[in-house]
Image: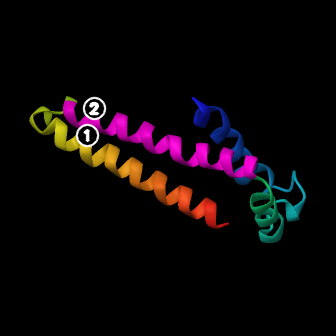
C-alpha cells in the first residue's frame, strides 16, 4: 500500500511535471537529488519503501499467476525463486541507499 501511495506521485513528478517545464529545471539535477538523499535518512527510508515494497508485490502476484496457469506442482520452488528474488533486490537496494 505504501508503494501505491508514493509511486504514482513520484512518476508524475519525474515523468510529467519536470520534463514539461511545470517545475524548475534543476529540480532533478544530480547535485540537488544527491544532497537530498545523502543528507536525510527519512528520504532514504521513503526511497527504500518505494523501491523495495513493489518487489514483494511483484513476487506474490507472479508466483500465484504461475500457479494459476498450471505450475502448481512446483509452487514451493516458485515461492523460493520469486520471494528470494524480492529479498535479493531488497538487500541490494538497502546496500545502495546505505552507501549514498
Q: Is residue 87 left or right of residue 39?
A: left
Classify mark 2: helix, strand or loop: helix
Q: Residue furthest right?
A: 24
Query: Badge 2, how many Cα within 10 Å: few under 14, some, many 20+?
Result: some
Q: Residue at x 63, y 67 (%)?
A: 99
Query: Badge 1, how many Cα within 10 Å: few under 14, some, many 20+?
Result: some
Q: Is residue 84 left or right of residue 20?
A: left
Residue 4 coordinates in the image, percent (x, y): 59, 33
Q: Say above or below: 51 vs 63.
A: below
Q: Residue at x 18, y 43 (%)?
A: 77
Q: Is residue 51 left or right of residue 71?
A: right
Residue 90 coordinates in the image, percent (x, y): 48, 51
- Residue 23: assigned label: none
Alpha-carbon span between mark 1 and mark 2:
9 Å
State which region is magenta: 41-67
Residue 45 magenta-drawn? yes
Which residue was labeled with disc 2? Answer: 64
Classify mark 1: helix, strand or loop: helix
Residue 46 coordinates in the image, percent (x, y): 68, 44
Q: Earlier in the sequence, mark 1 or mark 2?
A: 2
Q: Residue at x 18, y 38 (%)?
A: 76
Tell which of 49 and 24 is nearer to you: 49
Q: Residue furthest bottom?
A: 31
Tell which of 91 and 60 is nearer to you: 91
Which residue was labeled with disc 1? Answer: 79
Amino acid at each position: 500500500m505504501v508503494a501505491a501511495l508514493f509511486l504514482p506521485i513520484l512518476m508524475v513528478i519525474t515523468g510529467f511535471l519536470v520534463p514539461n517545464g511545470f517545475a524548475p529545471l534543476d529540480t532533478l539535477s544530480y547535485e540537488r537529488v544527491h544532497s537530498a538523499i545523502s543528507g536525510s535518512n527519512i528520504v532514504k527510508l521513503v526511497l527504500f519503501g518505494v523501491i523495495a515494497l513493489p518487489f514483494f508485490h511483484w513476487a506474490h502476484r507472479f508466483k500465484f499467476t504461475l500457479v494459476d496457469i498450471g505450475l502448481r506442482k512446483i509452487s514451493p520452488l516458485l515461492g523460493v525463486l520469486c520471494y528470494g528474488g524480492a529479498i535479493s533486490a531488497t538487500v541490494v537496494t538497502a546496500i545502495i541507499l546505505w552507501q549514498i
